[in-house]
Amino acid sequence: MLSKLSFVLNQLFLLLRIDRRHLPVFAFLLTLSTLFWILTVLSKDYTTTVHYKADFIDLPVDKLLIDEEEVDLHLQVIAPGFTILAHRLSFRNELPLSVSSFIPKKKGNYWNYFLLGEQSISQIQEVIPTSMQLLHIQPNRIDLLLDEKAERVVPVKLKSSISFKDLFRQKEAVKLEPSTIVISGPKAVVEVFDEINTELLSLEDVDNNKNGEIEIQSLNHSEINYSVKNIKWEFKVEQFTEGEIKLPIEMKNVPKGYEIKLFPDEVTVSYLISLDKFDLVKPDMFAAQILFDSDFKRQSVNLSRQVDFVENVRVFPSKVEYFLIKK
């Protein structure tokens, strides 16, 4: 390949009768003349089409753009070659368009802001390079769909998957800070949400108090903004145990002239309670009772009194047999 190139150059030198000693001078003159030719070509004006991406600015403060599709602008211009070349080599060709100059029109629940290209040549002329003379714009009409901007206060809901070690449980509701947030965005979208979830909080084998911070769950609506994006959470854990007491059964509604013999005549009450309150439970805090009903062969036992700091209260047996004895 090199030998062929050398042969071609030698033939060219012979044809042009160039002495090899004058080759550097020839190369310099050739480069200089090429440069002058390029400068001459680029300094001339040309009619061409340049392309921009529309960048919408100066939106109304009380409205939000809900149609964010890119708008390609094709501008027919007269410009020097230098300007056209610089535009073609640019990596960022965005043209700012002020929405405040668009014409607003109500369209259902939304607002349609539009710009007529041929009527806005003077406006666009101001934002393109001064060396460009704008002749024509495509598309001839640009439409934007805007919605009223709205705000709404919504509660935060913690999504969680928490498991505890044996004999441990959550003591009280999880505290969130803040427990409500403000969401803002297009009115039609904001009104859809009654609450905002967090990302999933996953904990296993918990046996002590916990706290931390978690992010708000992202929504499939990029136009929605949050007053905060991180929520602090805290919950307390307690150890619990099972307790039980035996209670006599009180009778109500016994027919006059009769007495009742129950089998058995007492019941066992079992319950779950926090370990630190176990010693507070006394038998007189509970009362077991039967409201006699002769239609039933077995009578149901109910608790007519119990304290509120015990949970999962159960009575065994829940029904008892009886004999009705005439006095």
Image: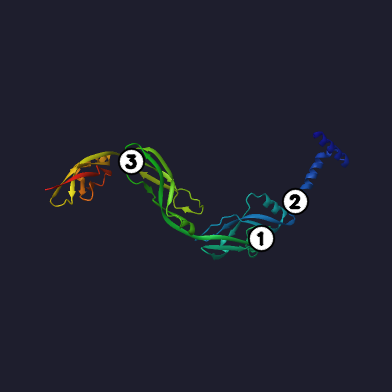
* Disc 1 target residue: 137
Q: Nearer the viewer, mark 3 or mark 2?
A: 3
Q: Residues within 10 Å of mark 1 (few under 14, many from 20)?
A: many
User: Which residue lies at the image location 76% right of the left edge and 48% below the top edge?
Assistant: 35
Secondary structure at badge 3 equals strand
- The amino acid type of the residue labelled 1 equals Ile
Dividing the picture into quadrants, the one containing residue 17 is top right
* Of callouts 1 and 2, the N-terminal one: 2
Q: CA distance from mark 3 to mark 2?
A: 82 Å
* Of callouts 3 and 2, the N-terminal one: 2
The quadrant in which the N terminus is found is: top right
Q: Observer-nearest residue: 7 or 267?
A: 267
In the image, farthest residue toward the top: 3
- Expressed as whole percent of the image width and height from the top left, the position of residue 209 reads 34, 40
- The amino acid type of the residue labelled 3 equals Arg
Q: Observer-nearest residue: 297 or 32?
A: 297
Secondary structure at badge 1 equals strand
- Expressed as whole percent of the image width and height from the top left, the position of residue 247 reads 20, 42
Q: Nearer the viewer, mark 3 or mark 1?
A: 3
- The amino acid type of the residue labelled 2 equals Leu
Q: Nearer the viewer, mark 1 or mark 2?
A: 1
* Disc 2 target residue: 39
Is residue 276 visible to the viewer in this orientation of the structure?
yes
Is residue 305 visible to the viewer in this orientation of the structure?
no
Q: Which mark is residue 169?
A: 3
Question: As displayed, is residue 315 above or below residue 154?
Answer: above
Contact, mark 3 vs mark 2 (Cβ under 8 Å)? no
Q: Would residue 74 be found to the left or right of residue 188 on screen?
A: right
Contact, mark 3 vs mark 1 (Cβ under 8 Å)? no
